[in-house]
Image: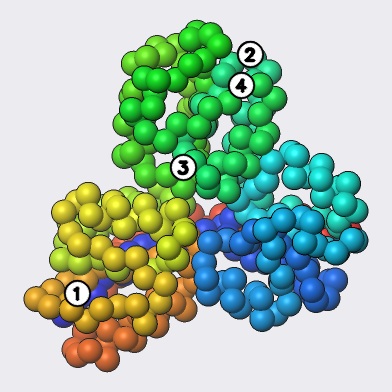
Amino acid sequence: MELILANPRGFCAGVKRAISIVNKALDLHGRPVYVLHEIVHNTHVIHELRNKGAVFVEQLEDIPLGSVTIFSAHGVSRSIMERASELGLRVIDATCPLVAQVHRRVIHLNHLGHDVLVIGHKGHPEVEGTCGHAEGAVHVISSPEEVANLHVTDPNKVGYVTQTTLSIDDTEKILAALRKRFPITAQCESTNICFATTNRQKAVRELAKITDLLLVVGSKNSSNSNRLREVATSQGIPAYLIDDASEINPDWLRDVQRIGLTAGASAPEHLVQAVVVWLQQQGRLVLTEMEGQEKNTFFQLPDMTI
């Protein structure tokens, strides 16, 4: 059996930055530090940080007065920021810089008098945070069908942004519907889907052409990991999202000659390597890796001397 590793895969620059922020906050300020929501969507990362002294909460009111508080990589609304200040919390913002760019575009479009369409998954923390920066009309669009029923203030003043972790193909379908209904929609030079999401989806699309099965390492609540699985299934091969090697069903491997393996942008590489070891233990395995390399992007950490 042959195993082909996707390239690129795993941690993106925004995830690395967010995890580094929590670790550095623990070093600087001691335990505990509080994190509003999961810092990134991966159960293993959360478990590791919790063991170091990070406390994950769903409401600001659960955080003691004056505590070090970190906003997750997905970003938060302005009302959350204001509430944290009212509660006297010492805030460190781990919002991914690419998500912060989307926030700024929402504000800019509203200032131009546009209704803003946020293309993304309703209820996702990133989408809720993005909508929470609007200073005018904002609407969430999750499918092409929703475009027909959309009511806007002025059809000639409509702009859009996208969640950074969407499927490229699904987003294009929604944009096609938008352009048909609102021909003069304010265009971005591109979507706001981040380069890490785009590169990982492209790698999976190529991998699906030459494999019989794809395993995606990532947690069930990880948007970008779910999109990788969907890209593979759209290419006609079975694909499974697993948190780690313990979730592999040996029945999946029957009559499979060539397996593809990738990881979502919030999944650590050691989980990928553990899957490799598990597969090696099942019998003879030829291991190869796709050509290609992601640009080595680094996002600077914020000032954490609060």
Alpha carbon distance from label 4 to label 1: 47 Å
Nearest the camera: 266 or 249?
Answer: 249
Residue located beneath label 2 in the image: 113
The residue singled out by tag 3 in the image is 121
Q: Earlier in the sequence, mark 4 or mark 1?
A: 4
Whole-angstrom CA distance, mark 3 to mark 1, is 29 Å
Spot occupied by residue 87 in the image (x, y as percentages of width and height) = 87, 52
Label 4: which secondary element: loop
Measured in 3D between alpha carbons, the distance from the residue under mark 4 to the one under mark 2, in whole angstroms, is: 9 Å
Q: List x then y, in percent, for residue 35.
A: 71, 62
**In front: 71, or 56?**
56
Circles 2 and 3, Cβ within 8 Å, touching? The answer is: no
Q: Are marks 2 and 1 in contact (CB under 8 Å)?
A: no
Residue type at the position of mark 4: Ala
In the picture, the disc for residue 137 is 4
Residue lying at 52% horizontally and 67% vertically, measured from the top left: 42
Q: Secondary structure at mark 3?
A: loop
Question: In 3D space, how far apart are the residues under numbered discs 2 and 3 (Cα atoms)?
Answer: 24 Å
Label 2's element? loop
Q: Measuring 40% from the left and 20% from the top, which residue is drawn there?
A: 149
Q: Is residue 235 visible?
A: yes
Residue contact at pointers 4 and 2, CB within 8 angstroms:
no
Amino acid of disc 2: Gly
Q: Which residue is mark 1?
A: 252
Label whose residue precedes the other's in the sequence (4 or 2): 2
Q: Nearer the viewer, mark 4 or mark 2?
A: 4
